[in-house]
Image: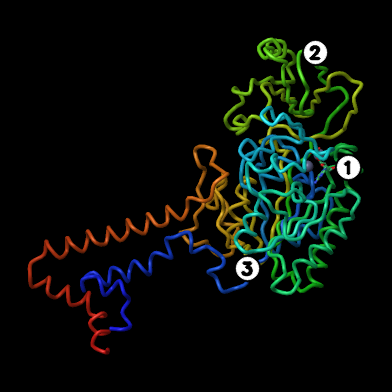
Amino acid sequence: MARRTMLSCLLPGALSPLFCLWAVLLPVVSPNSLNHHEHQDPRPKLLLVSFDGFRWDYIDRVPTPNFRKVMDEGVKVEFVENVYITKTYPNHYSMVTGLYAETHGIVANEMYDPALNLSFSMETDSMYDPRWWEEAAPLWVTIQKDGGRSGAAMWPGSDVKIHGMFPTRYLQYNASVSFEYRVRRLVEWLSAPEEEAVDFGVLYWEEPDESGHNLGPQSPLMDAIIAGIDEKLGFLMDELKKAGLYEKVNLIVTSDHGMAQLSPEKIIELDEYVDRDLYTWVDKSPVVGIMPKEGKVDEVYGLLMDANPNMVAYKKEEVPARLHYQHNIRITPILLEAKEGWTIMQNRSGPFMLGNHGYDNTLRSMQPVFVARGPAFRQNYVKTAMRSIDLYPLMCHILSTRPLPNNGSLLNIQDLLSSEPAASTPTPAHPATPPEHHGYSYAPVVGSFIGVVMVLGFLVVYVLLVTLKQRPALKHRSWEMSQPLLQEDLHL
Ligand code: AMP
Ligand code: ZN
Ligand code: ZN
């Protein structure tokens, strides 16, 4: 009797096996079962690397033996659809939140928030105000709340206190700090003694974006820049090997966006169409945020809507739904989107670049590279397409941490994994509406609900069997089902 659970004592004998079944099934169906602190094994390690502006096809342009090695030993994705607008800040925050920019709130590199009456710019300290970032929580915050540790080497936003937290280890942003220094620090953090080692690392490098802007992606001079990035990847792999981490760490190498070739012949001068006094210019080409002065939205829109065949003007509420770029106060009332390769300026006196990004995220030129290797990944596998927001649930799965509500889907991307995730993985596939991202996951409620429904289902089936069948059969069935409990009773 002592070995029987308290609840099974309270249940009639015939129901005890049902309780046992429930007790066995509940941890399987409940997303709480993913909580890492319930696991005994050390948390798997994951390092996410972004080479800013590394376009998907750069790996085939010059020999890139290190990218190729990662692909051969792991996976590659050919088409990666990133998020609109295809700029650095929105995309880096999407990768670590699984959210479209309209939902995570970092809608551009330059923003104005009318509710806060604040401007955000990468070039000022404004970006250190947590209020810009707290419409979402990045993965390093989630993993630390789940008892894990993270390390960040200059990932956009990683030196900002978000929801009261910095990454466990991080570097203050400084563009002049070398790639090699960033790598050495990260490898040091990943290989620290077990009780201090970070589980999740993020690493950012400014190239080949900077050269892509200055030279234009078609320049032959880009070949050497790309080869140099491959060498940097080789350095990272060597450092991981030296630290004995190469076989343990799951390494993802990707980027925020690609790069399009511009031309001085393809310039749209806004001053030709609209008086500067009528609006404030918030974000730069190729998707220019226009904030008309009080009461001037219709007038400014009327002047711009058919102004130039190489530029589309959207009122905010008319932005196509597929771009997921509407539902945020920081998106300006009017957006001007240049056609690929075109530049929007007020006039030609401003600085001109030979390469740029920010255009429509379905353009091939805007898409980034994606390769990954490590114990969680399949080997020598090429996947056709993914969305960069799917990376977040994938990383949560690898790190055994429960994702916050997000726009991504593990289902879309799980074929990259060496073993199929359990069916219970609590990732919502394509939520129809932008999720509430201030709160916590609703997954435990869903898990418990499924558990209760299953128990009720078994109860109904059992009662039907018991009541609808004739008595001799009932006697036989009843004996079979309660036999384990009777045996336990007999031994006590
Ligand atoms: P983009 O204009 O979208 O090409 O942005 C790329 C540039 O963003 C890089 O060349 C860096 O100068 C800048 N950047 C990236 N991360 C940070 C950061 N954490 N703080 C300030 N600037 C950054
Ligand atoms: Zn970038
Ligand atoms: Zn750039």
The residue to which callout 3 is attached is 43
Marked residue nearer the N-terminal end (3 or 1): 3
Query: Dot 3, how many residues are within 10 Å of its Cα: few (below 14), some (14-19), or many (20+)?
Result: some
Residue at (76% x, 62% y) in the render = 69
Query: Dot 1, how many residues are within 10 Å of its Cα: few (below 14), some (14-19), or many (20+)?
Result: some
Q: Mark number for residue 340?
A: none
Nearer to us: label 2 or label 3: 2
Amino acid on which disc 3 is placed: Arg
Nearer to us: label 3 or label 1: 3
Which quarter of the picture shows residue 9?
bottom left
Measured in 3D between alpha carbons, the distance from the residue under mark 3 to the one under mark 1, in whole angstroms, is 38 Å
The residue to which callout 1 is attached is 211
Residue at (82% x, 55% y) in the render = 171
* Pick the front one: 386 or 423: 423
Circles 1 and 2 in contact, beta carbons < 8 Å: no
Q: Is residue 30 above or below residue 157?
A: below
Nearer to us: label 1 or label 2: 2
Return the x and y of residue 454 as percentages of the image width and height: 32, 59
Return the x and y of residue 357 as percentages of the image width and height: 77, 35
- Mark 1 falls on what kind of element? helix
Amino acid on which disc 2 is placed: Asp
The residue to which callout 2 is attached is 277
Q: Quadrant of the C terminus?
A: bottom left
Q: Is residue 408 left or right of residue 208?
A: left
Residue at (60% x, 57% y) in the render = 396
- Mark 3 falls on what kind of element? loop
Q: Is residue 295 above or below residue 69?
A: above
Give ligand 2's quarter of the image: top right
